[in-house]
Image (cartoon, rainbow, N blue to C red):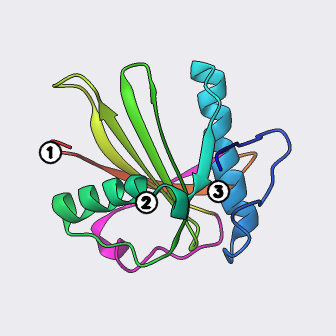
Amino acid sequence: MPYTVDFKNVSTGGLESSPVAETLAGLRANESRYYSNKYGHDFTVSPASEVPEVVDYVSRILKEERDIVIESRPLEATTFEVDGLRMTYVFYESGLAINVMYSIEDGGKRAVGFKLSDGMEIPEELGTRFKFARQKSKLAGVIRGSYFVIKGEY
């Protein structure tokens, strides 16, 4: 059942099995605040088991674009459209959050972003492939992030 992520009262609901549940919840709330402030969009998520097609979409892009397979269990996922972009998120038990930004119009921005919750190690499957920049967040502590541009059609 989908629910709206509250960024004012951060909850670990749905993320309890993560060893970094608190900071992953902060990361999820940080994304919710961004979409609320920028687009007036309510950021809702569902248990990953209820939206396997969303997880499969992200997994397919990772595999086909960079031969990446995420080892961690997906906990929650969402997909929505704002401002001509289809945004897709998967939050993983390890503390990793992956988003796919895919412009609906040809020639627009298309990329995969990785965000690491404060306190988690860089996953082995991403290891030396990406450099992670640091960003401070009141909700999530220090977020480390990286991305790559999508070349294929999805």
Query: Is residue 7 on the magenta stretch?
Result: no
Upstream in the sequence, badge 3 or badge 2? 2
Could you say which disc has been placed on residue 66 in the image? none
Say if 67 sits above or below 30 in the image: below
Percent coordinates x, y for residue 144 in the rendering: 52, 58
Q: Amino acid at mark 3?
A: Val
Label 1 sits on residue = 151
Percent coordinates x, y for residue 94 in the rendering: 56, 74
3 or 2: mark nearer the eye: 2
Q: Residues within 10 Å of mark 2 (few under 14, many from 20)?
A: few
Could you say which disc has been placed on residue 52 in the image? 2
Q: Amino acid at mark 1?
A: Lys
Upstream in the sequence, badge 1 or badge 3? 3
Q: Is residue 49 left or right of residue 101?
A: right
1 or 3: mark nearer the eye: 1
Q: Which residues are magenta?
A: 118-136
Q: Nearer the viewer, residue 84 or 129?
A: 84
Q: Residue at x 48, y 49 (%)?
A: 89
Q: Is residue 96 left or right of residue 111?
A: right
Instruction: Give the spatial CA distance, label 1 vs label 3.
Output: 29 Å
Q: Residue at x 17, y 61 (%)?
A: 64
Upstream in the sequence, badge 2 or badge 1? 2
Could you say which disc has been placed on residue 142 in the image? 3
**Quarter of the figure with the C terminus:** top left
